[in-house]
Image: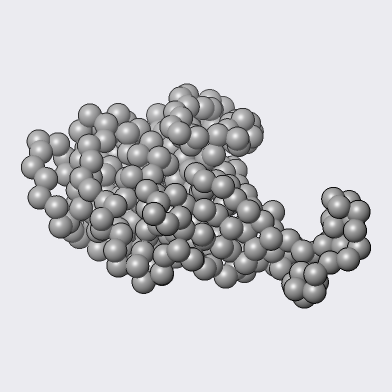
Amino acid sequence: MEWTDISITVAKRDADTAEAIATMVANGGIYIEDYSDLEQQAWEIAHVDLIEQDLLDKPRDIVIVHMYLAPDENPAEVLPLFEERLKNSGIGYQLNTTGVEQEDWQNAWKKYYHAMDIGERLAIVPGWEDYRTDRIRIVMDPGMAFGTGTHETTSLCLETLDSLVKGGERVLDIGTGSGILAIAALKLGADSAEGVDIDPMCVRTAGENAARNGVADRFKVLVGDLSDKASGQYNIITANIVAAAILSLAPHVPVLMAPGARFIASGIIDERKDEVLAGLKAAGLEPVEVKEKRGWVCIICEKKEA
């Protein structure tokens, strides 16, 4: 069985950002090719100044971050998440895979995706699968937009929505991806939802998934970011994105929260939990619950009293 090597090539100045994103997304190992100080490293490690010419010919102004997926991991779930986070970071990059052809994971991801129960009320069901259940069915064809329910960050959010949505809420989903969180909220009883994403592909996919689930008339999907698209106040706000993006948008969230509202922040690797908790508190958000699953963290907040 073959592992998948996902490599991201970036400028040297963006290496730390790419490494951080890869660390957040990967469950397996990470290997970094950085030849910018090759001679110094060779001397410090082996005390030699004779280096093979093929190494000397390596470019010094780029860094390649390799992320490895085990044979049982789903490239179709990880690759869109990885690329979404890279796009959100604003850095230039080139993404490549070996061990699996891009066409394979674009068209053969269905074998990794099956119906699953989440929380007390939800069932996430692929459109091609006959899954009979008394639960609320969310029919998903995720395409290439992140968010199928199988990744820990998404399932943590879905479980939280299952417990929070009582009926009649106005919902905002930041970085909506496939639209699964907003769609789930609507099918659980929310009155309306808005999804915001900077990627037009995600917005298109989210709109298609909303129509598939019969909630398109209550779900508005917008291309853009939080600052220029969200308006008014919401009862539930979700952000299943990277820690850095959550910290960046957190100061803008309290004003969007109606009395008694909850902000659900996910996509946080456990190593950054304390940093994000501190940032949320500094932004005027009070964490009321922290959920963790296999190295990922979901933080539920309320607005601090003035």
Residue 174 can be seen in this image: no
Q: How many numbered dots are placed on residues in this image?
A: 0
| Residue 21 horizontal/vertical position (percent) | 58, 52
Q: Nearer the viewer, residue 297 or 76?
A: 76
| Side of 261 relative to 16 (left or right) | left
Note whether 279 is above or below 215 in the view shown.
above
Q: Nearer the viewer, residue 130 or 112?
A: 112
Q: Nearer the viewer, residue 12 or 111?
A: 111
Quadrant hosting residue 149: top left
| Residue 123 horizontal/vertical position (percent) | 20, 40
- The type of colouring in the image is one colour
| Residue 5 horizontal/vertical position (percent) | 51, 59
| Side of 137 relative to 50 (left or right) | left
Q: Quadrant of the C terminus?
A: top right
**Which residue sits at x=45%, y=33%?**
294
**Which residue sits at x=62%, y=67%?**
9
Note whether 94 is above or below 163 in the view shown.
below
| Side of 287 relative to 58 (left or right) | left
**Which residue sits at x=22%, y=29%?**
120
| Side of 49 relative to 95 (left or right) | right
Q: Quadrant of the N terminus?
A: bottom left
| Residue 169 horizontal/vertical position (percent) | 29, 39
Quadrant hosting residue 133: top left
